[in-house]
Image: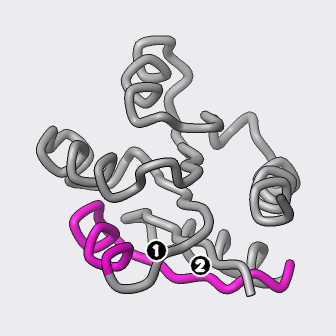
Amino acid sequence: MSKALIISSDEGARYLYQVVISYQKISVITADSIAKGIKTVEKDVPDIIILDIMVSDFKDVGLLKDLKEKLGSMPLVIMADIKSSSSKKEVSILGAIKYMVKGESSLSDLIKTVRKVVNK
C-alpha cells in the first residue's frame, strides 16, 4: 500500500488531509514538526510528503537541510498560506514537486497530486 507523510503543526489540517488521502486507499502517517517528520522518515519511508511550511521549526535551516538529505528524490508537496514568489523560491530549494496555496488549492487538487505520485 502506498504511504503519505503529512507534516503540519495545524491539527485540523493534518486531520483533514489524513482523512481525504486515506480515503484514496493510501496509508497516512503524520508529524507536527519537521524534526518529528525526519524521525518518521528514518523509520517508515513514505512515497510522498506533504509539508505545511507554517510548522514552527520551518525556519530552522539545519532541519530543512536534514529533511532534504533524508528525502533524496522523494516527492514533496508544499502547502502554504503564502502566495509570494520568494516563498516559492525558498521551497524550490527543497525540490518540491508542487507548491499549493491553501486558499487557492482545493482538496481535490491535493488528492490528484498525491494519486499521480503514488500511482507511478
Query: On the image, numbered disc 1 is attached to which residue?
Result: 11
Q: Position of residue 54 (x, y in %)?
A: 37, 47
Q: Residues within 10 Å of mark 1 (few under 14, many from 20)?
A: few
Q: Is residue 52 magenta?
A: no
Q: Residues within 10 Å of mark 2 (few under 14, many from 20)?
A: some
**Stretch in magenta:** 24-42
Position above or below: 34 against 43:
above
Query: On the image, numbered disc 2 is attached to which residue?
Result: 15
Q: Position of residue 69 (x, y in %)?
A: 29, 50
Would you say 81 lies left or right of 118 here? left
Decide: marks 2, 1 in contact (CB < 8 A)? Answer: yes
Label 1 sits on a secondary structure element that is helix
Label 2 sits on a secondary structure element that is helix
Position above or below: 78 against 90:
below
Location of residue 108 (image quadrant): bottom right
Along the line of sight, the residue nearer the viewer: 73 or 80: 73
Location of residue 101 (image quadrant): top right
Residue shown at the point (65%, 36%) measured from the top left: 98
Quadrant in the picture for the N terminus: bottom right
